[in-house]
Image: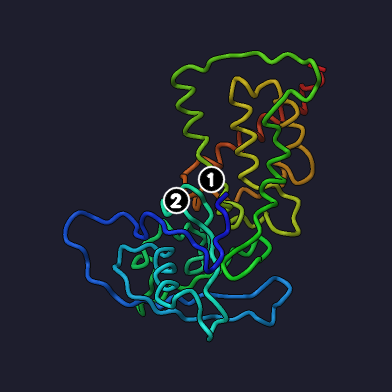
Amino acid sequence: MAKSIPPQEQQEPSSTKAPAAAGSAAPEQEYTLAVQRQDALEKPETRRVDELRVRCSPGTSVLGALKLEREARDGSTSKSGGSVAWEGDCFDGSCGGCSMLIQGKVALACSVPVAKAADKDQRVRLAPMRHFPLVRDLVVDRSRVQRLLSLVPLQGPRTAGAPVQSETPSAIHALELARLDQCNRCGACLEACPQYGVHSEFVGALTLHEAHLRNSTPSGRHQRTERLEAMMAPGGVNSCGKAQNCVEVCPAQLPLVDSIQSVARATTKHMLLGWLFK
C-alpha cells in the first residue's frame, strides 16, 4: 500500500502524465477539479467542495493534475486551509494508493487522463472512497484490508512440526499464478461492492481472491483447509451478493468473479466431504 503523502512533503514523481499517443503534444487546457474535502472524520462540519483550476495537457492524469495544482499554489491555500491531501507515489498504477471516486466511480487517479474524466464543462468531481473511514480529504484508512487478509494464512503451517511439501509448478501454472498475483490492495473492488462496508462483516472480493490464489499454489496447499474454513465463517463467501461490480472496476483486470466461484465450490465440497479427511 502506498504511503500517505503529506500535503507539503510529496516526492517528485518521475511523470505526472498518463501514457500519451504518438505525435505532437496536445495544447494545454484549463480544467476544474471539484474536490470534496474534510479535515478529519470527527470534523463533519468542515466538509466542503473546493474548486481548483489547473492548466494541463489532456493526457495528464487526474493525479498529475492534483500535483500540478498543488505546485501552482506552492503547497498552501488560505481559502481551503491547505493543500488537498491524497495518496499515491508511483504514478503508474502499481501502488494502488490513489484510488478515489472520480465522477462518482472508483478508479486509480494516476491511470485516468483528466480529459477522459472531465464533463462537457471541463469539470472533474473528486471524492474519497465511501466504504473506508476518512482520514482527510481524499485519504482514507485502508488498514482493515490487512486485517481481512490476516484471515488468509500466507505462512505456515500453523501446526508445529507439520510437514511442508515442496513442489515446482509447471510453466503454464506458474504463468497463471503470476497473472492472478497482481492485486495492489487499492480497495476498488471493496468500494464498488454493495455488500462491503464499515459496518459489514463481509470480507470482500479481495480476500476471497487471495484465498483462491494461495490455495492454488503448491506451497500453500498445506493450509488449504484453514483458509476454506475461514471463508466459511460469517462474512465469508456466502455473504457475496454476486453483484459482480468488483470485476468491472478492478484496475488489474483480475478474474475476481471466477475466484469467488472457485472458493464457493471449494467450501461447499469441504462442508460436505471435509469430515472424511479429519
Q: Pointer 2 and pointer 1: residues touching (CB < 8 Å)?
A: yes
Amino acid carrying mark 1 in the image: Asn
- Left/right placement of residue 158 relative to residue 218 reads right
State whether residue 250 is above or below residue 35: above
Where is residue 11 drawn, in percent x and y?
A: 47, 59
Give the secondary structure at mark 1.
Answer: loop
Give the secondary structure at mark 2.
Answer: loop
- Left/right placement of residue 191 relative to residue 171 reads right
Q: Earlier in the sequence, mark 2 or mark 1?
A: 2
Which residue occupies the foreground of this view, 248 or 57? 57
Q: Residue at x 82, y 20 (%)?
A: 275
Q: Residue at x 45, y 26 (%)?
A: 175
Where is residue 180 drawn, in percent x and y?
A: 51, 35
Colour mode of the rendering: rainbow
State whether residue 213 is above or below residue 10: above
Outermost residue toward the left in this view:
24
The residue under label 2 is: 93
The residue under label 1 is: 184
State whether residue 145 is above or below residue 106: above
- Left/right placement of residue 162 relative to residue 217 reads right
Outermost residue toward the bottom in this view:
79
Which residue occupies the foreground of this view, 94 or 131? 94
Circle number at residue 257: none
Amino acid carrying mark 2 in the image: Gly
